[in-house]
């Protein structure tokens, strides 16, 4: 496999500008995870990454469910992704959904992916331009994916983690939702869900990881991650598996490798049923 074009999971706009004007520009694939809306400006050559649609398992009753390995591989190929490509993920927000595609690729063994720091706004602030031109469909790629064990966690595994909490090698569940939602002091934005959090979980709101439209410096991230998880492995959760990936991104930046995402997150856990829920209200 060719040498990676960007060895870090976060790339700044200046570096991206150099890459798209460089000798390996044909290996750069920009995907925009913003909601697909015709006529909305985007970075030139960016392709839509439809997280609410084709890039999630449409047979699932839960939002943003990870598709099967083969489904995801085929959809990346439609974006022109090859094994030597480098995928840059951007969005309209500074950092909200773009970590999810990055983690999805990581979970499938494709590590040549990065999140654009500051998203489209950061690109413009650095002097980049946007366009409303529709990016033509690329030639299909040939990327081959292999699932990374432990990167995507299901509800049964979370139940086992909670039951084994006294074992110091057991992962810590880290919840990216707001403190008010975690405590059960406000109603969930999705109807029909209980309020509160999973037993043994700690709270690290994803908004704490961001400051002034940028992800915090590594040493600040380290304090946040260590404060939430100690030296335990991490299973991140949120509302539907999207902002949990911001915790995974921060943990990766500080050198953690023992990370998983609870894919169903609160949208699955908080449905009426037998899963335990704790409130601080």
Image (tube, helix red, strand yellow):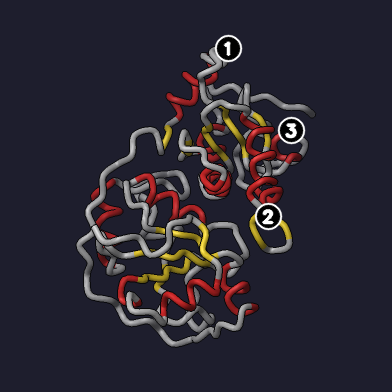
| Residue at the outermost top position | 166
Q: Which residue is mark 3?
A: 183
Report how far apart the C-alphas of labels 2 and 3 lie in the structure.
21 Å
Neighbours of disc 1 within 10 Å: few (<14), some (14-19), many (20+) = few
Say which of 127 and 198 sits in front: 127
Quadrant occupied by the C terminus: top right
Q: Which mark is residue 166?
A: 1
Task: Give the answer, above or below, for where 61 lies relative to 54.
Answer: above
Q: Is residue 258 above or below residue 103?
A: above
Q: Residue at x 27, y 69 (%)?
A: 80
Where in the figure is residue 152, as x and y percent of width and height? 41, 38
Q: Quadrant of residue 47?
A: bottom left
Q: Which sits earlier in the primary sequence, circle 2 or circle 1?
A: 1
Q: Earlier in the sequence, mark 2 or mark 3?
A: 3
Marks 1 and 3, how far apart at CA: 22 Å
Q: How many marks?
A: 3
* Residue pictured at 60% horizontal, 37% vertical: 193
Q: Name the spot of residue 161 as percent of width and height, x first.
A: 50, 21
């Amino acid at each position: 496999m060719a040498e990676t074009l960007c060895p870090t999971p976060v790339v700044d706009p200046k570096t991206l500008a150099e890459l798209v004007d460089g000798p390996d520009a044909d290996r750069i694939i920009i995907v925009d995870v913003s909601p697909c809306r015709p006529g909305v400006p985007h970075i030139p050559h960016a392709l839509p990454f439809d997280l609410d649609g084709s890039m999630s398992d449409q047979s699932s009753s839960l939002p943003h469910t990870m598709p099967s390995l083969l489904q995801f591989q085929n959809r990346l190929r439609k974006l022109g992704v090859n094994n030597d490509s480098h995928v840059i993920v951007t969005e309209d927000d500074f950092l909200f959904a773009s970590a999810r595609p990055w983690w999805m690729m990581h979970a499938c063994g494709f590590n040549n992916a990065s999140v654009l720091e500051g998203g489209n706004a950061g690109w413009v602030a650095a002097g980049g331009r946007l366009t409303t031109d529709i990016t033509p469909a690329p030639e299909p790629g040939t990327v081959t994916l292999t699932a990374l064990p432990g990167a995507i966690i299901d509800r049964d595994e979370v139940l086992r983690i909670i039951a084994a909490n006294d074992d110091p090698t057991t992962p810590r569940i880290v919840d990216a939702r707001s403190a008010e939602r975690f405590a059960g002091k406000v109603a969930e934005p999705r109807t029909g869900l209980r309020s509160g959090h999973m037993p043994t979980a700690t709270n690290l709101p994803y908004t704490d990881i961001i400051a002034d439209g940028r992800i915090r410096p590594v040493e600040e991230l380290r304090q946040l991650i260590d404060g939430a998880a100690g030296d335990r492995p991490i299973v991140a959760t949120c509302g539907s598996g999207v902002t949990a990936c911001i915790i995974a991104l921060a943990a990766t930046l500080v050198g953690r490798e023992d990370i998983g995402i609870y894919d169903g997150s609160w949208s699955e856990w908080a449905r009426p049923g037998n899963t335990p829920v704790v409130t601080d209200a």
